[in-house]
């Protein structure tokens, strides 16, 4: 089994602060993102990802985010197995120190 690509929460923060455009998907539940999520991220709860495959472009690379990096890794393998380019943000939002906003 190959390794899933990873990126640290600090690397994501640095890329965003440098003005890079990233395709971020936050797979946490509604009550978790209500406490704050990365403003550039799209919220697709883990249980809903399979219903949103048509919304994703397999030419793009997606960085997956959850609270600690475990759920996003599971979603990463699911998307990887469906032909998508994915990167798991290790450490999740627990280690992310950048700007966040509550999801409306």
Image (cartoon, rainbow, N blue to C red):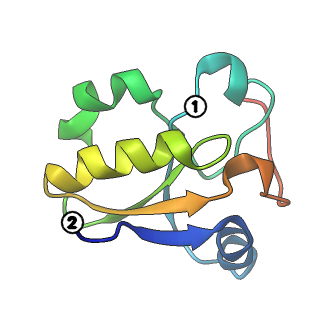
- Residue 29: x and y in percent read 58, 22
Which circle marks residue 1 in the picture? 2
Q: Position of residue 9 (x, y in %)?
A: 69, 65
Q: Which element carries disc 2, helix, strand or loop?
A: loop
Name the mark nearer the viewer: 1 or 2.
2
Quarter of the image that includes the N terminus: bottom left
Query: In the image shown, does 72 or 19 lie closer to the viewer?
Result: 72
Quadrant location of residue 34?
Answer: top right
Residue at 26% x, 44% y is 78
**Which residue in the structure is indicated by mark 1?**
28
Residue 18 image position (x, y, % from top left)? 71, 82
Which circle's residue, 1 or 2, is located before the other in the chain?
A: 2
Q: Is residue 4 or residue 87 the one in the foreground?
A: 4
| Residue for point 83% across, 55% down | 99
Residue 44, image x, y percentages: 45, 32
Quadrant position of the C terminus in the picture: top right
């Amino acid at each position: 089994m190959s390794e899933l690509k990873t990126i640290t929460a600090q690397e994501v923060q640095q890329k965003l602060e440098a003005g890079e455009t990233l395709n971020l998907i936050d797979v946490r539940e509604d009550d978790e993102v209500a406490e704050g999520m990365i403003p550039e991220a799209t919220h697709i709860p883990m249980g809903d990802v399979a219903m949103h495959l048509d919304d994703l472009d397999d030419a793009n690379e997606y960085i997956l985010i959850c609270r600690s990096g475990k759920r996003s890794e599971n979603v990463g393998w699911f998307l990887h197995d469906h032909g998508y380019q994915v990167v798991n943000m290790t450490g999740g939002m627990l280690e992310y120190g950048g700007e966040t906003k509550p999801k409306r």
